[in-house]
Amino acid sequence: MKITAIMPCRGRADQTITNVRRLLSTAGYAEWQLICMIDDDPIVDHAIMDADLPVWRATTPGRVGYWRCLKAATEHWPEFSHLINLANDLIPGQHWLRRAVEAYRKQFGDGDGLLGFNGDSHEIGHSCHFLISRELLDRYGGWPVWYDHAYGDTELCQRAIADRCYAKAPWALLFHNHYYFGAENNDAVYQEGARNVGQDAELYERRKRNGWQL
C-alpha cells in the first residue's frame, strides 16, 4: 500500500513544523510520503524550506481552502494508491499510520475503503481524518471541493457507511487539537474556515436529499 498524506498548511508556521516532525517520527510505516500543500502562505512555505524536512511541498497562487488543496496535491502526485487528509493542528499517537494500515488491511484487504483515525472526539460514524483508497475517492467525485471548509468529511464518511466500506480504527490516533474540542486557540485560520459553515451545512443537507448531487 503506497500512501500519500496531504497536509494543507495555512498559518501557524511553528506549530506546522512541530506537527510535521511528530508525524514523521511516530508513523511507524515506511511506504508513505507527506505533502505539505501550502495555501497561499509564504511564511509557512519558507519555514518548511528552512527546516529542511523530508517532505514534498507545493503552493497555491491564492487561498483555495482545505478541499481544493487536497485536490491539487492528489492530481499533482497521481502515483499513490491510498490517500490521507491531514491538518496542521494534529497530535499523532505512536505508530498512528502503521496501526491505520493494519486496521485497513484487516477490514478491507486489498479492496476499497475509508478508514477513519480516532482522536477527533466524534462518534464511530464520523472521522475528520482518514485513510481512503484513491478508487473509492474517485467514485465519490474526488475531494469534495463543493464545500468551502466544513462537511466534506461528513459527506465522504456517510457515503462510505452507506456503501459498507467504512471503518474507524480505535488505536490509530490523530488527536484533533481544535478549539471546537476545548483547545484555546480560535485563531484567524479557524475563523476563516468557519466563515461559511452555515452555507456548507445547507449544501450538505441538500446534497444528501438529492442523492449526493449538486
Image: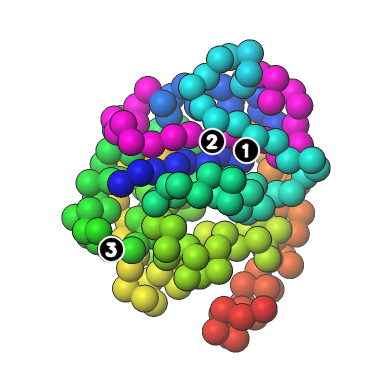
Q: Is residue 200 above or below residue 207?
A: above
Q: Is residue 125 left or right of residue 107?
A: right
Which residue is painted at 19% across and 55% down in the image? 106
View extreme (front): residue: 79
Q: Residues within 10 Å of mark 1 (few under 14, many from 20)?
A: many
Percent position (x, y) of residue 198? 72, 65
Sequence-first disc among 1 and 3:
1
Disc sitting over residue 21 in the figure: none
Mark 1 in CB contact with mark 2 (< 8 angstroms): yes
Residue at the disc numbered 2: 35
State how far apart marks 3 and 2 are (Cα).
Answer: 24 Å
Tag 2 secondary structure = strand
Which residue is painted at 34% across and 62% down in the image? 113
Which residue is painted at 55% across and 39% down in the image? 7
Decide whether residue 211 is among the magenta residues: no
Q: Is residue 119 left or right of residue 59?
A: left
Residue at the disc numbered 3: 111
Q: Is residue 211 left or right of residue 59?
A: left
Residue at the disc numbered 1: 37
Which quadrant holds residue 23? top left
View extreme (bottom): residue: 210
Percent position (x, y) of residue 66? 64, 49
> Which is nearer the eye, 143 or 56?
56
Amino acid type, mark 2: Ile
Magenta segment, which residues?
25-47
Which quadrant holds residue 63? top right
Which residue is painted at 36% across and 76% down in the image? 163
Amino acid type, mark 1: Met
